[in-house]
Amino acid sequence: MFQELPTVDSIGANKFFISYTGVSNSGKYRSGWDSLTIIKGPWHTPGAQIISQYNYTITNSNGKKMTLVGFDTITNVNGDNLFYLINGTNGCTSLTTTHVGTATVTFDDGSVRTWHHSRQKVRTYSTPGSFGGVITATITGTKNVLTYTGIEAWGTNRNGELFYGQIPVASPLIYGYTVGSSTSCTHFWPYSGVYIHQNILSGLKVTFGVGSNGAILNPIEPCPYGVKLDWTYLSASKEVIVAY
């Protein structure tokens, strides 16, 4: 057994090709490739895009396989970059990117499922012109599916059930990132927002940034207690509050 290591090959100034082979520490073997291409100008150009394409197979330690083939397009809507945002260069006050993609997953039994995602991320900075402030990232779903708005993911799950992932328009996911340092309340978890995963038989609603009693904090606090999970299956339901 050996450590899984990606091999990065540069193909021109704006394209990189990554090939995978080996076994990870979790015992999963990955083989295949991933590529990244920048088009429509340098990344800080308005409308510039990063195109990610991938085709790789993951084999578990029990021999079962899963193959993923797909793409992801990240668009720099207004141009600029994080350096410009933090320093206020060129009057940059926000950085907006959109993420759109599709993945086709083939399971070990030959069944094929297709998943999609469509979301927007808007970053702002609390103290432009100096390091040590906080970058705030607000994430919303940008797709309408049937009568639902704010959809960021949808498709068919392994059981053949239609599903969707929704970020309600009134409750976007809000993250905070401290520039130059890492704290438990500004990394990894949203400190506000709601995410709903729903299929035919079950559903999960995740409410971020709640107090120890599960109530949404108002006003929003950057270091809340945790998240509230509301799970339903047929007529059964359960609620759990989990600390960050």
Image (cartoon, grey):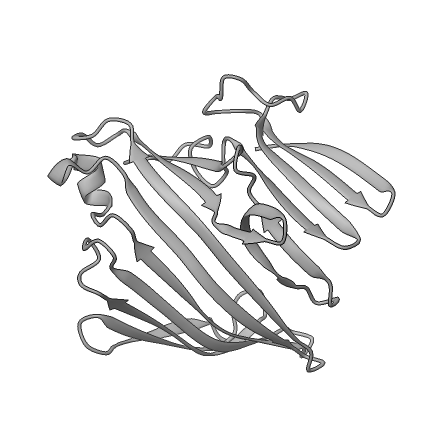
Report whether 90 appears left or right of 192.
left
Foreground pick, 112 / 241 = 112
Name the residue nearer the viewer: 107 or 50. 50
Is 116 positioned to the left or the right of 137 in the image? Answer: right
Q: Quadrant of residue 187?
A: top left
Question: In which quarter of the view is residue 228 placed?
Answer: top right
Q: Going 46% across and 30% down the picture, which residue do you hit?
A: 185
Q: Is residue 1 visible?
A: no
For the question of whether residue 69 can be seen, the reply is yes
Position of residue 15 measured from the top left corner of the image (x, y, whole percent): 25, 73
Q: Quadrant of residue 73?
A: bottom left
Q: Percent from the top left, x then y, of residue 188?
A: 47, 41
State how many labels appear.
0
Residue at the spot x=45%, y=42% of the render?
Answer: 139
Vertical arrangement, residue 200 with respect to residue 194, above or below:
below
Q: In the rendered view, does 28 fall on the left or right side of 156?
A: left
Q: Is residue 8 above or below residue 50?
A: below
Q: Residue at image x 54%, y 62%? A: 116
* Residue nearest the viewer, comparing 113 with 126: 113
Q: Seen in the image, is 59 located left or right of residue 22?
A: right
**Residue extending furthest top?**
219
Furthest residue in direction left, as rendered: 90
**Residue 81 spot, x, y in % from top left:** 22, 47
**Where, quadrant-wise, is the C terminus in this rendering?**
top right
| Residue 14 placement (x, y as % from top left) | 21, 70
Residue found farthest to the right: 235
Residue that sits furthest to the bottom in the current view: 110
Task: Tell me: residue 120, above or below residue 26.
Answer: above
Q: Residue at x 69, y 50 (%)?
A: 198
